[in-house]
Amino acid sequence: MTAQLARKPENTGVMEIIRCDSSAQAERETAATLRRYITRTAKPALGLATGRTMLPVYAWFREWYRDGELSFANSTSFNLDEYCGLASDDPSNFVSYMRRNLFNHVDMEEGRFHFPEQTDPEAFDARIGDSGGIGLQLLGIGRNGHIGFNEPGADRNSRTHVVTLTESTRNANAGDFPAGTPVPEQAVTMGIATILEAQRIVLLATGNGKADILKRAFHGPVSSDCPASYLQLHNHVTVICDGAAAAHLGEPS
Ligand code: GLP
């Protein structure tokens, strides 16, 4: 595992890139980073993400909770995004994903985890603000550079809002739905400004399918064409990746 610090010209902050020897090591390192934050903070406020990349991270949380090494009793969480138009108990929505993979298995009480709602997106930013803001935001990255569901073209100043998903994102997520069930066309997501207000951001990317977009996001220009590139504007980002995802990092753009 190697860590590299890059000081971005756009700001005075530090971006840390941690290259791990395997995806398993990257997943554990990500989970351990959140665990350190949770155990050292009186009232942790977590920003959480879904997607296949995060499944092993939540598996670590479940294991550490079972072993008495981690508690979520004092934590509050805010998930990045949710599909529009699905029933609240639809197994393909992100609430169900989080219950299945984390909340049903740990001491996170009902009412302490929050999801944006299409009927009142702005209320989500207000709720985050009321909690004192997100202390650590966990992020994955879409192959087109989306973070949350902020697709290419996303506005730097956007707050939680309803978005229309691109065809490529809907295709990428089709496997999370039963065969023949269409992926919703819309979703509600934290905006770029909402995400950038987190005190610290940890982005996990694994596999060679993420190699091109990681290079664009962190070695390319800050541009709405690649929403993840906005993370260069943040002053405390940690990118954790395996060798496959890091394959093009370090190459000139
Ligand atoms: C999803 C989520 C993102 C996630 C991304 C990557 O659509 N909205 O939060 O980071 O796409 O997903 P995966 O980890 O399955 O590649």
Image (tube, rainbow, N blue to C red):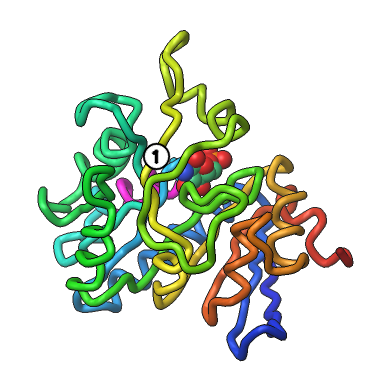
Q: Nearer the viewer, residue 85 or 47?
A: 85
Q: Nearer the viewer, residue 184 or 101?
A: 184
Verify whether residue 147 appears in magenta: no
Q: Nearer the viewer, residue 2 or 153?
A: 153
Q: Is residue 234 above or below residue 66?
A: below
Give the magenta part as a residue range. Answer: 56-64
The residue carrying pointer 1 sits among few (fewer than 14), some (14 to 19) or many (20 or more) residues within 10 Å by Cα, namely many
Q: Is residue 230 left or right of residue 34?
A: right
**Residue type for callout 1:** Ala
Q: Residue at x 64, y 67 (%)?
A: 18
Verify whether residue 59 appears in magenta: yes
Residue 247 place in picture, x, y as percent: 80, 53
Q: Is mark 1 within 8 Å of ligand 1?
A: yes
The residue tagged 1 is 187
Instruction: Quarter of the image for the N terminus: give it.
Output: bottom right
Residue 2 place in picture, x, y as percent: 70, 70
Callout 1 secondary element: strand
